Image: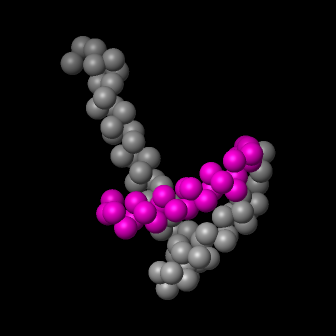
Amino acid sequence: MTVEERDFLNQINAYAEEVMADVNPEKVRISEQLDMLRPILQKLAMVHSMPVEEVFLKYMDLATEAAVEREARFKEEFKEILNPEE
């Protein structure tokens, strides 16, 4: 992930933490959660001259990539505990 991509993802995540701090994702419909994120998605769409839908797709791709990176780091850090026979 490039520095620009990480910044893009961090902007959305920071906004989400601020506006969705009290939201239980299991109880709030996805469409409502997306409505809460719409202002930052629209802002990034304007800044990057992209459709809002493309910003959302890029966000989902980057969030998935970040999750895979976190999982790989976790597995590396705890490999002795997770696989003691290796």
Q: Residue furthest left?
A: 86
Residue 50 visible here: no
The answer to which quarter of the image holds residue 73 is top left
| Residue at image location 72% in from the left, 63% down from the top | 36
Question: Residue 14, position in %: x, y?
Answer: 56, 56
Identify whether 4 is placed above or below 51. Answer: above
Residue that appears at 44% across and 47% down: 67
Note whether 68 is above or below 80 in the view shown. below
Q: Is residue 62 magenta?
A: no
Q: Is residue 83 left or right of residue 56?
A: left
Q: How is the image coloured?
A: one colour
In the rendered view of the protein, which quadrant contains the C terminus?
A: top left
The location of residue 16, given as percent across then percent down, is 63, 56
Residue segment shown in magenta: 1-26
Q: Position of residue 45 (x, y in %)?
A: 55, 79
Left or right: 37, with 53 as reference point: right
Query: Farthest residue in the bottom direction?
Result: 49
- Residue 21 seen in the figure: yes
Nearer to us in this view, 6 or 32:
6
Dominant SS type (magenta)? helix
Where is residue 7, by image quadrant? bottom left
Residue at (76% x, 60% y) in the render:
32
Quadrant where the image shows the N terminus: bottom left
17 part of magenta stretch: yes
Q: Is residue 21 left or right of residue 4?
A: right
Residue beneath the point at 24% across and 14% down: 85
